[in-house]
Image (spheres, helix red, strand yellow):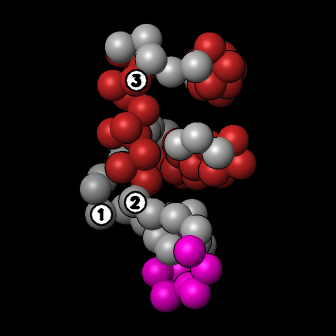
Amino acid sequence: IVNDAKWKGMVDMVLEFKKKFNHVHIPNSYRPPDSNPKSAVGDDLINGFKLMSFINKVRPLILRDALSPKRVAHLKRLS
């Protein structure tokens, strides 16, 4: 995710999931409670973007040391 606002929104959703379930092993079928797949707005956050897809994209970036230092620091502060 290039857009910082979308990044923050996705991280916030991961945090909400973690608060609710005490882990971040998000099932592929999980959708945030406030997602609306029928929204006319083209935003992934509103259109029921699968949170697991976000996790699947971020984890390899962390392992390859390809995530920006700013975002790595953001994630470390949250854990």
Q: Distance between the residues labelled 3 and 1?
A: 22 Å
- The residue located at (46%, 81%) in the rendering is 37
- The residue located at (43%, 11%) in the rendering is 65
Q: What stretch is highlighted in magenta?
A: 35-42
Q: What residue type is labelled 3?
A: Leu
- Compare residues 44 and 32 and report the one nearer the observer: 44
Residue 61 is labelled as: 3
- Location of residue 57 with respect to 78 vertically, above or below: below
Task: Specify whether residue 38 is painted magenta.
Answer: yes
Mark 3 closeness class: few <14, some 14–19, many ≥20 residues within 10 Å: some
Mark 2 closeness class: few <14, some 14–19, many ≥20 residues within 10 Å: some
Q: Is residue 26 visible?
A: yes
Q: Name the residue under label 1.
A: 29
Q: Quadrant of residue 45?
A: bottom right
Q: In x, y percent, where is residue 55?
A: 40, 40
Number of residue marks? 3
Q: What residue type is labelled 1?
A: Ser
Relative side of 53 to 13, left or right: left
- The residue located at (53%, 80%) in the rendering is 36
Q: What residue type is labelled 2?
A: Lys
- Location of residue 37 with respect to 69 vertically, above or below: below
Q: In which quarter of the image is residue 58?
A: top left
- The residue located at (40%, 23%) in the rendering is 61
Q: How far apart are marks 1 and 2 (CA)?
A: 7 Å
Q: Which residue lies furthest to the front in this view?
A: 2
Residue 50 is labelled as: 2
- Location of residue 36 with respect to 43 vertically, above or below: below
Mark 1 vs mark 2, foreground winner is 2
Mark 3 vs mark 1, foreground winner is 3
Q: In x, y percent, where is residue 9?
A: 65, 51
